[in-house]
Image: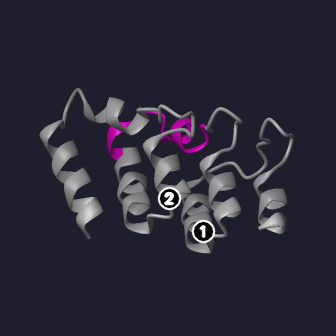
Amino acid sequence: GGDVTAISKFIGLQEGRYAKELLKLPDPEGRGSALCLSIVHNKDNVFEFFLAKVPEHLEQPDRYLNNGDTEKKTPLMLAAIAGNALMVEKLLEAGVLPHLQSQARMKASHYAEQA
């Protein structure tokens, strides 16, 4: 609801040259992109909004979808840690790479087993 409306309005105001930067804007605490933040905070509607915007605004969406936080935890790993099966499914459908490893040398499947 409100989260998506506010974000959509903000991005709508910034369309064009700023939209790419907004999608790639890192979290000051090192938790990754706006997509990663939506996963960490378990905001399904915001997650879906950003996931939908990726192919529209980025030339190489796979780089964004597989780009992790400071510990190299990808969005897929973060969704697995959160135990959010819907996010995991949508990320896999979007073409993320499930075999990537974090800085701790763990894959998303390892994090899912621990969740």
- Magenta extent: 56-67
Percent position (x, y) of residue 37?
49, 49
Q: Residue furthest left?
A: 13
Q: Would you identify the image quadrant in which residue 32 lies?
A: top right
Q: Which mark is residue 41?
A: 2
Residue 38: image location, x then y, percent: 46, 55
- Residue 18 lies, in percent from the top left, at 25, 29
- Most extreme residue toward the top is 17
Left or right: residue 115 versus residue 31 is right
| Residue at left offset 21%, top offset 61% | 5
Q: Is residue 104 above or below residue 98?
A: above
Q: Would residue 51 be counted in the magenta stretch?
A: no
Question: Which of 111/19 is in front?
Answer: 111
Picture residue at 60% right of the left edge, 68% below the top: 89
Kindly report the distance in space between the C-alpha atoms of the residues bearing marks 1 and 2. Answer: 17 Å
Left or right: residue 112 compared with residue 55: right
Closer to the camera in the image, 2 or 9: 2
Sequence-wise, the earlier of marks 1 and 2 is 2
Colouring style: one colour
Residue for badge 1: 89
Which amino acid type is marked by label 2? His
Residue 71 to residue 55: above or below:
above
Quadrant holding the N terminus: bottom left
Which type of secondary structure does the marked residue at label 2 adopt?
Answer: loop
Describe the element under mark 1 as helix, strand or loop: helix
